[in-house]
Image (cartoon, rainbow, N blue to C red):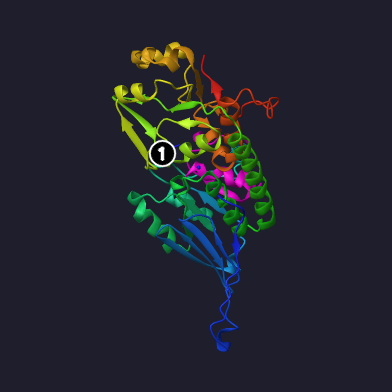
Amino acid sequence: MKRIFLLLIFFLFAFSCKKEISKSDFGNITISERVNYSDESKNLVINSGKFKNVIPKKKLPFQKAMLLNSSLIGYFSELNLENKITGVSSPEYIFSEKIHQLIKENKIQNIGNEQKYDIEKILSNKPDVIFTNYVPNFANTYDILKKNGITLIFLDEFLEQNPLEKSKYLLLFGKLFGAEKQAEETFKNIENNYKKIQTLASKTFNKPNILCNEMYGSQWFLPGGNSFVARLINDAGGHYILKDNKESSSVPLSFEEVFVKSENVNYWINISPHRNKKELLTLNPNYSKMKVFNSGNLYMINNREKDNANDYFESGVVRCDLVLRDYFKIFHPEDVTFKSEPLIYMKALK
């Protein structure tokens, strides 16, 4: 599986000499260290990781898009752009009811899954653009799509570790689909909400100790101290047990190592879906030795789950403010700011 600062718009003008006055960049938007785009006179230039797209403005806004990974669905839903989608992969992992309704109405096609995409169906549908994470094994497939005149944009948003930067991808989708104003307003709202909660958390005296995830096989994969989850925990006023770690990727530890580090943990979050604590214990009886299992608070990320689809990995990718609010409510039950608002993505494990 299974996503900043104030909106930054830089207008760069060249004034090196009089001959250069007529040359200017219309706008250069930085989403993150990985992604930026520039609005030039005739083209929109997108840089995403090692990939570059030069899109003639005459092709914009796009009208027909296909998504090869469901994590990008949330951006379209947040901007009410579902009607621009004509194909998705693995619809069983999509949470959006509107997307499923459009699939039933045959307005959105099922174009396969991450094992095999239906190239013929994709080509016959003639999309303007396809968005996907870059997967080296599909290099030949990408070449076929490009040779047939389809714009392919690689957006590895899952690599972003700053919650607000991941949300800021909204600006790029707004630019590509003629919804710039809505995208700017939506992102600004998310950013304001996030920073409001961040400020509340910074003023709390209680900084509870936090443990994440659970064991898989013989190892416990904890988010690195510079990871997306670690930043959310910190911004919500929690003290993550690997806070001082410098990794952004997962850190594999043994049960014994986690046991020692979690001696004074108050909250255990991001647990996979289980019916109850007893079921969790059947997977690893050693959990019963942990203080947090016996007297702490355990939370799963399945409050918005339907069959194989989990909205935490869909709208939660975009709405980092709502995810942060969940964590803040969990870590600081004494604060009444959001008392009347229920948890959205998290659910207590009893």
Is the residue 102 above or below the residue 282 in the image? below
The quadrant of the rendering that contains the N terminus is top left
Q: Say left or right for 215 vs 81.
A: left
- The kind of secondary structure element at disc 1 is loop
Pick whichever, 93 or 163, lies toward us: 163
Left or right of 218 in this view: 169: right
Q: Is residue 119 left or right of residue 348?
A: left
Q: Is residue 281 magenta?
A: no
Q: Amino acid at mark 1?
A: Gly
| 77 inside magenta stretch | yes
Q: In the rendered image, which quarter is residue 294 located in?
A: top left
Residue 93: x and y in percent read 50, 35
The residue at the point 42 percent across, 60 percent down is 51
Q: Residue at x 53, y 62 (%)?
A: 37
Q: Residue at x 56, y 30 (%)?
A: 327
Q: Which residue is mark 1?
A: 225
Which residue is farthest right? Answer: 340
Start-end of magenta stretch: 69-97
Q: Position of residue 66 (x, y in %)?
A: 52, 50
